[in-house]
Image (spheres, rainbow, N blue to C red):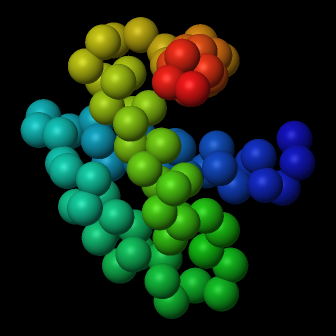
Amino acid sequence: MGKVKQAIVDVQEEVMNIVQGITTPSLPDVQTILFKKYWHKNNNGFFLDEKVVSNAYNKAVYEKENEEEYDDDRYRDADIIIKEDEC
């Protein structure tokens, strides 16, 4: 696995750990937790990247609420179809 892909997987795992409590924290709460934990590290990967964290948060919340694995390909294809229909 490439370095970028592994860094994104690390973010997804960290966000999943944060979201798995009894109550689901908001995206800004998750971003704050990650900021406080990783801002001072020289190699913070994608933990402070807003888009990567947002995607990881959406995936984690989906998996928590639906109790099934999020399928990136299925939703990526649906986004493409929606965008084509908007044209």
* Horizontal relation, residue 5 to residue 14: left or right: right
* Horizontal relation, residue 87 to residue 15: left or right: right
* Horizontal relation, residue 20 to residue 6: left or right: left
Q: Position of residue 47 (x, y in %)?
A: 53, 65
In this rendering, the answer to whether 34 lies above or below 73 is below
In this rendering, the answer to whether 21 lies above or below 78 is below
Residue at the image point whose x is 25% and y is 61% from the top: 28
Q: Position of residue 45 (x, y in %)?
A: 66, 68
Q: Position of residue 53 (x, y in %)?
A: 47, 54
Residue sitting nearer the eye, 81 or 19: 81
For this orientation, the residue located farthest to the right is: 2
In this rendering, the answer to whether 82 lies above or below 3 is above
Residue sitting nearer the eye, 15 or 84: 84
Residue sitting nearer the eye, 59 or 81: 81
* Horizontal relation, residue 48 to residue 23: left or right: right
Residue at the image point whose x is 43% and y is 50% from the top: 54
Residue 79 visible in the picture: no
For this orientation, the residue located farthest to the front is: 87
Residue at the image point whose x is 51% and y is 56% from the top: 51
Q: Position of residue 85 (x, y in %)?
A: 54, 16
Residue 47 visible in the picture: yes
For this orientation, the residue located farthest to the left is: 23
Residue at the image point whose x is 69% and y is 55% from the top: 7
Q: How many marks?
A: 0
In which quadrant of the rendered image does the C terminus lie? top right
In which quadrant of the rendered image does the N terminus lie? top right
